[in-house]
Amino acid sequence: MPFLLRVELPDVPGSLGRVAAAIGEAGGDIEAIEVVEHRADDGTAVDDVLLETAPGVMPDSIVSACNLLDGVHVLWISRYAAGGNLFLDLEAVEELSEHPVQALDRLIELIPAVFRSDWAARVRRTEDGVTVLHSTSAAPDELGWFDIDRSTMVESDDENTVLAAAPLLNDIVVVGRRGGPEYLESELARMGHLIGLAITISRS
Protein backbone atom coordinates (compact mmCIF):
# COMPACT_ATOMS: atom_id res chain seq x y z
CA MET A 1 0.00 0.00 0.00
CA PRO A 2 1.46 3.39 -0.95
CA PHE A 3 1.64 6.11 1.69
CA LEU A 4 2.41 9.79 1.41
CA LEU A 5 4.55 11.20 4.20
CA ARG A 6 4.97 14.95 4.70
CA VAL A 7 8.02 15.70 6.81
CA GLU A 8 9.70 18.84 8.13
CA LEU A 9 13.48 18.61 8.37
CA PRO A 10 16.58 20.82 8.67
CA ASP A 11 17.44 22.36 5.30
CA VAL A 12 21.05 21.23 5.41
CA PRO A 13 23.03 18.62 3.46
CA GLY A 14 22.49 15.09 4.73
CA SER A 15 19.11 15.64 6.37
CA LEU A 16 17.12 13.94 3.64
CA GLY A 17 19.58 11.06 3.60
CA ARG A 18 19.03 10.51 7.34
CA VAL A 19 15.26 10.52 6.82
CA ALA A 20 15.54 8.09 3.90
CA ALA A 21 17.72 5.75 5.97
CA ALA A 22 15.26 5.84 8.88
CA ILE A 23 12.35 5.05 6.56
CA GLY A 24 14.25 2.13 5.06
CA GLU A 25 15.20 0.71 8.45
CA ALA A 26 11.57 0.93 9.56
CA GLY A 27 10.38 -1.09 6.55
CA GLY A 28 9.48 1.60 4.05
CA ASP A 29 10.60 1.72 0.41
CA ILE A 30 10.79 5.25 -1.03
CA GLU A 31 9.27 5.65 -4.50
CA ALA A 32 9.58 9.43 -4.97
CA ILE A 33 10.42 12.63 -3.10
CA GLU A 34 9.33 16.21 -3.79
CA VAL A 35 10.55 19.33 -2.00
CA VAL A 36 7.38 21.25 -1.12
CA GLU A 37 8.85 24.27 0.65
CA HIS A 38 12.15 25.84 1.70
CA ARG A 39 11.84 28.02 4.81
CA ALA A 40 14.72 30.47 4.89
CA ASP A 41 13.44 32.10 8.09
CA ASP A 42 14.06 29.04 10.26
CA GLY A 43 16.35 26.91 8.07
CA THR A 44 13.90 24.07 7.53
CA ALA A 45 12.33 22.39 4.52
CA VAL A 46 9.13 20.42 3.96
CA ASP A 47 9.27 17.34 1.73
CA ASP A 48 6.62 14.93 0.47
CA VAL A 49 7.80 11.31 0.41
CA LEU A 50 5.86 8.66 -1.50
CA LEU A 51 6.66 5.25 -0.07
CA GLU A 52 5.56 1.64 -0.01
CA THR A 53 5.55 -0.39 3.19
CA ALA A 54 6.72 -3.95 3.55
CA PRO A 55 4.06 -6.53 4.54
CA GLY A 56 3.15 -6.17 8.20
CA VAL A 57 4.78 -2.76 8.59
CA MET A 58 2.54 -0.15 10.18
CA PRO A 59 2.88 3.49 9.13
CA ASP A 60 3.20 4.49 12.79
CA SER A 61 6.57 2.75 12.97
CA ILE A 62 7.85 4.86 10.07
CA VAL A 63 6.56 8.04 11.70
CA SER A 64 8.26 7.11 14.97
CA ALA A 65 11.56 6.35 13.22
CA CYS A 66 11.55 9.75 11.50
CA ASN A 67 10.54 11.68 14.62
CA LEU A 68 13.49 10.21 16.52
CA LEU A 69 15.87 12.14 14.27
CA ASP A 70 17.08 15.52 15.51
CA GLY A 71 15.15 18.38 13.95
CA VAL A 72 12.79 16.08 12.02
CA HIS A 73 9.02 16.19 12.48
CA VAL A 74 6.41 14.22 10.53
CA LEU A 75 3.54 16.56 9.72
CA TRP A 76 1.23 14.02 8.12
CA ILE A 77 1.01 10.50 6.75
CA SER A 78 -1.85 9.05 4.76
CA ARG A 79 -2.65 6.34 2.25
CA TYR A 80 -2.00 7.61 -1.26
CA ALA A 81 -4.02 6.14 -4.10
CA ALA A 82 -3.10 8.61 -6.85
CA GLY A 83 -0.76 6.26 -8.63
CA GLY A 84 2.83 5.16 -8.30
CA ASN A 85 4.43 8.58 -8.50
CA LEU A 86 4.07 12.19 -7.48
CA PHE A 87 2.40 14.35 -10.11
CA LEU A 88 4.33 17.58 -10.60
CA ASP A 89 3.27 21.03 -11.74
CA LEU A 90 5.17 20.75 -15.01
CA GLU A 91 3.44 17.49 -15.85
CA ALA A 92 0.09 19.16 -15.21
CA VAL A 93 0.96 22.03 -17.57
CA GLU A 94 1.97 19.53 -20.26
CA GLU A 95 -1.33 17.70 -19.83
CA LEU A 96 -3.32 20.94 -20.03
CA SER A 97 -1.43 22.03 -23.14
CA GLU A 98 -2.41 18.82 -24.90
CA HIS A 99 -6.13 19.57 -24.33
CA PRO A 100 -6.52 23.37 -24.38
CA VAL A 101 -10.26 23.36 -25.07
CA GLN A 102 -10.89 21.27 -21.95
CA ALA A 103 -8.07 22.87 -19.95
CA LEU A 104 -10.21 24.34 -17.16
CA ASP A 105 -12.12 21.11 -16.55
CA ARG A 106 -8.93 19.09 -16.80
CA LEU A 107 -7.32 21.44 -14.28
CA ILE A 108 -9.93 20.46 -11.69
CA GLU A 109 -9.23 16.79 -12.36
CA LEU A 110 -5.46 17.26 -11.99
CA ILE A 111 -5.37 19.47 -8.90
CA PRO A 112 -5.91 16.65 -6.34
CA ALA A 113 -2.86 14.74 -7.59
CA VAL A 114 -0.67 17.83 -7.92
CA PHE A 115 -1.54 19.15 -4.45
CA ARG A 116 -2.00 15.82 -2.61
CA SER A 117 -5.67 16.50 -2.00
CA ASP A 118 -8.81 14.38 -1.92
CA TRP A 119 -10.97 16.44 -4.25
CA ALA A 120 -11.38 19.67 -6.19
CA ALA A 121 -14.34 21.58 -7.58
CA ARG A 122 -15.04 24.67 -9.67
CA VAL A 123 -17.99 26.63 -8.33
CA ARG A 124 -19.93 29.69 -9.51
CA ARG A 125 -22.16 32.08 -7.60
CA THR A 126 -25.49 32.74 -9.31
CA GLU A 127 -28.77 34.43 -8.39
CA ASP A 128 -30.06 31.03 -7.26
CA GLY A 129 -27.07 30.25 -5.04
CA VAL A 130 -23.79 28.43 -5.63
CA THR A 131 -23.48 25.95 -8.49
CA VAL A 132 -20.79 23.27 -8.82
CA LEU A 133 -19.70 23.46 -12.47
CA HIS A 134 -17.16 20.65 -12.47
CA SER A 135 -15.71 18.46 -9.72
CA THR A 136 -13.88 15.25 -8.98
CA SER A 137 -15.85 12.27 -7.73
CA ALA A 138 -15.03 12.72 -4.03
CA ALA A 139 -16.09 16.39 -3.90
CA PRO A 140 -19.19 17.36 -1.90
CA ASP A 141 -22.38 17.88 -3.91
CA GLU A 142 -22.84 21.32 -2.35
CA LEU A 143 -20.21 23.93 -1.59
CA GLY A 144 -20.28 27.46 -0.27
CA TRP A 145 -18.87 30.62 -1.81
CA PHE A 146 -15.74 32.43 -0.62
CA ASP A 147 -15.02 36.05 -1.46
CA ILE A 148 -11.31 35.85 -2.21
CA ASP A 149 -8.86 37.56 -4.53
CA ARG A 150 -5.98 35.08 -4.24
CA SER A 151 -5.29 31.47 -3.30
CA THR A 152 -5.89 31.04 0.42
CA MET A 153 -7.01 28.70 3.17
CA VAL A 154 -10.75 28.97 3.87
CA GLU A 155 -12.99 27.80 6.67
CA SER A 156 -14.45 24.32 6.41
CA ASP A 157 -17.79 23.11 7.80
CA ASP A 158 -16.20 19.67 8.23
CA GLU A 159 -13.70 19.63 11.09
CA ASN A 160 -11.93 16.68 9.46
CA THR A 161 -11.30 18.49 6.17
CA VAL A 162 -9.04 21.45 5.45
CA LEU A 163 -9.97 23.66 2.50
CA ALA A 164 -8.19 25.99 0.15
CA ALA A 165 -9.79 28.17 -2.50
CA ALA A 166 -8.48 30.17 -5.45
CA PRO A 167 -10.09 32.51 -7.99
CA LEU A 168 -10.63 31.26 -11.54
CA LEU A 169 -12.07 33.96 -13.80
CA ASN A 170 -15.54 34.65 -12.31
CA ASP A 171 -15.55 31.35 -10.42
CA ILE A 172 -13.49 29.84 -7.62
CA VAL A 173 -11.68 26.54 -7.26
CA VAL A 174 -12.18 24.79 -3.92
CA VAL A 175 -9.80 22.01 -2.88
CA GLY A 176 -10.12 19.69 0.13
CA ARG A 177 -7.87 17.45 2.19
CA ARG A 178 -9.38 15.05 4.69
CA GLY A 179 -7.33 14.83 7.85
CA GLY A 180 -4.93 17.64 6.82
CA PRO A 181 -2.35 18.93 6.69
CA GLU A 182 -3.08 22.60 6.13
CA TYR A 183 -1.98 24.02 2.79
CA LEU A 184 1.41 25.71 2.92
CA GLU A 185 1.92 29.20 1.53
CA SER A 186 4.15 27.74 -1.19
CA GLU A 187 1.36 25.35 -2.23
CA LEU A 188 -1.17 28.18 -2.36
CA ALA A 189 1.18 30.25 -4.51
CA ARG A 190 1.74 27.31 -6.86
CA MET A 191 -2.00 26.70 -7.07
CA GLY A 192 -2.63 30.29 -8.14
CA HIS A 193 0.16 30.08 -10.70
CA LEU A 194 -1.14 26.81 -12.15
CA ILE A 195 -4.67 28.21 -12.42
CA GLY A 196 -3.30 31.26 -14.24
CA LEU A 197 -1.48 29.02 -16.70
CA ALA A 198 -4.63 26.96 -17.27
CA ILE A 199 -6.59 30.11 -18.10
CA THR A 200 -3.91 31.17 -20.60
CA ILE A 201 -3.84 27.71 -22.17
CA SER A 202 -7.64 27.61 -22.47
CA ARG A 203 -7.56 30.82 -24.47
CA SER A 204 -4.85 29.68 -26.88
Image: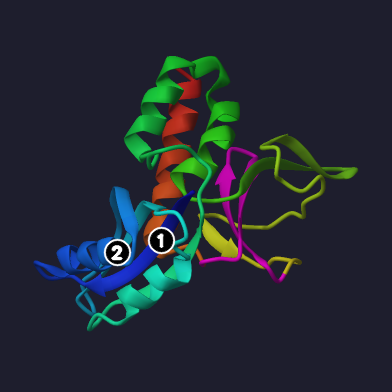
Q: Residue 152 location in percent, x, y?
A: 53, 61
Q: Of the two numbered discs 2 and 1 on the same chain, state the one appearing first in sequence.
A: 1
Residues marked 2 and 1 touching at CB (< 8 Å): yes
Name the residue type under label 2.
Ile
Q: Is residue 21 left or right of residue 195?
A: left
Vertical arrangement, residue 118 with respect to residue 178, above or below: above
Please state which of residues 54 and 82 is positioned toward the viewer in this rendering: 54
Magenta stretch holds residue 19:
no
Looking at the rendered image, the quarter that the C terminus falls into is top left
Q: Which residues are magenta?
A: 159-181
Q: Residue 62 location in percent, x, y?
A: 38, 68
Q: Quadrant of residue 141?
A: top right
Please state which of residues 127 and 32 is positioned toward the viewer in this rendering: 32
Dot 1: element:
strand
Residue located beneath label 2 in the image: 23
Q: Quadrant of residue 10?
A: bottom left
Residue at x-position 47% and y-position 37%:
83
Name the residue type under label 1.
Leu
Vertical arrangement, residue 45 with respect to residue 189, above or below: below
